[in-house]
Image (tube, grey):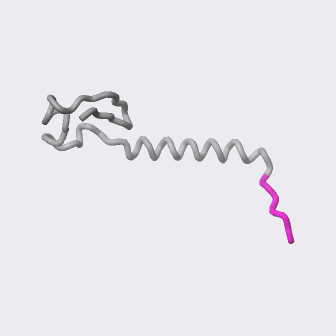
Amino acid sequence: MEKLSLPPRKYLLPAVASLIAIGGWQIKAHAQNKSDFPEGYDAVQVAPNSHRVLFENAFVRVLEV
């Protein structure tokens, strides 16, 4: 049975850097743009007495209901 050999280490850093760059691009490309969100569908605006924003950043919004 033949053993599979790993590629030389000199290829490891560029490969990892490429994967990180592609992953970052995917996150940025699929992040929700608030200007594209239809009016009247924001729970905090519609029901401010029962919905409160606990945490919000570019990727996540956590509500207390």
Residue at 17%, 42% (x, y): give it.
Answer: 41
Q: Nearer the viewer, residue 44 or 29?
A: 44
Q: Magenta part mainly helix, strand or loop?
A: loop
Task: Examine the image and state in which quarter residue 32 appears.
Answer: top left
Percent x, y for residue 38? Answer: 17, 44
Residue at 14%, 34% (x, y): give it.
Answer: 47
Which part of the image, by quadrant, shows the N terminus? bottom right
Percent x, y for residue 54? Answer: 31, 28
Q: Is residue 45 left or right of residue 16?
A: left
In the rendered structure, does residue 4 fall within the stretch colored magenta?
yes
Residue at 64%, 44% (x, y): give it.
Answer: 16
Range shown magenta = 1-7
Percent x, y for residue 13? Answer: 70, 42
Q: Residue furthest right?
A: 1
Task: Examine the image and state in which quarter residue 28 appears.
Answer: top left
Q: Is residue 57 left or right of residue 10?
A: left
Q: Is residue 56 left or right of residue 40?
A: right
| Above or below 63: residue 9 | below
Q: Nearer the viewer, residue 7 or 45?
A: 45
Which part of the image, by quadrant, shows the C terminus? top left
Task: Examine the image and state in which quarter residue 61 appears.
Answer: top left
